[in-house]
Amino acid sequence: MAVRSSGRGLAAAWRHELAFRIECIVLIFALPLALWLGKMPLEQAALIAVVAAIVVVELINSAVEAAIDRIGLEPHPMSARAKELASAAVLVTIGVALLTWALILWPR
């Protein structure tokens, strides 16, 4: 069942991925903060969505890393590139989140 697989995936990410745990904790703090700081529902949704997007992209990054490691642990340029690209996606998402929070909150 898909829901069961998703639950196992979330549990595995929590158990094995420090970055995922940190980002989930940030999301837990960001939720009430976004509801408090966002003046309009659209602002609140944007503040929450960009932090949630970090968690989503981190899950994809972890999946890429796990798949590459499953193929083999010996160094290979294509394996390194895949992992670096997935990691870069997380970094870009964090940058978008910071920019979104800054643009919404800076005028205040």
Image (cartoon, rainbow, N blue to C red):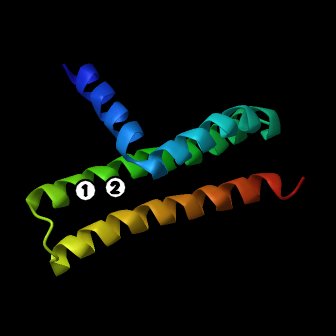
Which residue is at 18% across, 19% downward? Answer: 1
Kind of residue sitting beneath label 1:
Val
Give the secondary structure at mark 1: helix
- Please state the horizontal and vertical placement of residue 26, each as a whole percent of the image: 62, 44
Judge from the rendering whether residue 68 lies leftward or rightward of residue 104; answer left or right: left
* 50 displayed left or right of 101: left
Instruction: Give, as a three-letter code, the residue at label 2.
Output: Asn
Distance (Cα) linking label 2 and label 1: 5 Å
Q: Tag 2: Cα neighbours inside 10 Å, few (<14), some, or many (≥20)?
A: many
Relative horizontal placement of residue 92, taking residue 37 as reference (left or right): left
Q: Are marks 2 and 1 in contact (CB under 8 Å)?
A: yes
> Where's residue 46, x and y in %?
63, 43
- Quickly name the residue at label 2: 61
Determine whether 77 is above or below 101 in the image.
below
Q: Residue drawn 65% across and 59% down?
A: 98
Is residue 40 or residue 71 the one in the foreground?
71
Q: Secondary structure at mark 2?
A: helix
- Which residue is found at the position 80% from the left and 52% from the top? 105
Check residue 37 in the rendering and tell me which mark sits there, or answer none: none
Report which quarter residue 41 is drawn in: top right
* Farthest right residue in view: 108
Residue in front for this viewpoint, 42 or 1: 1
Residue density around tag 1, few if under 14, some if 14–19, many if 20 or more, within 10 Å: some
Is residue 100 left or right of 107 when viewed as pictured?
Answer: left
Quarter of image, res 102: bottom right
The residue to which callout 1 is attached is 64
The percent coordinates of residue 82 (x first, y second) are 25, 68
* Up-down relation of residue 86 to residue 34 (above or below): below
The residue closer to the viewer here, 102 or 61, is 61
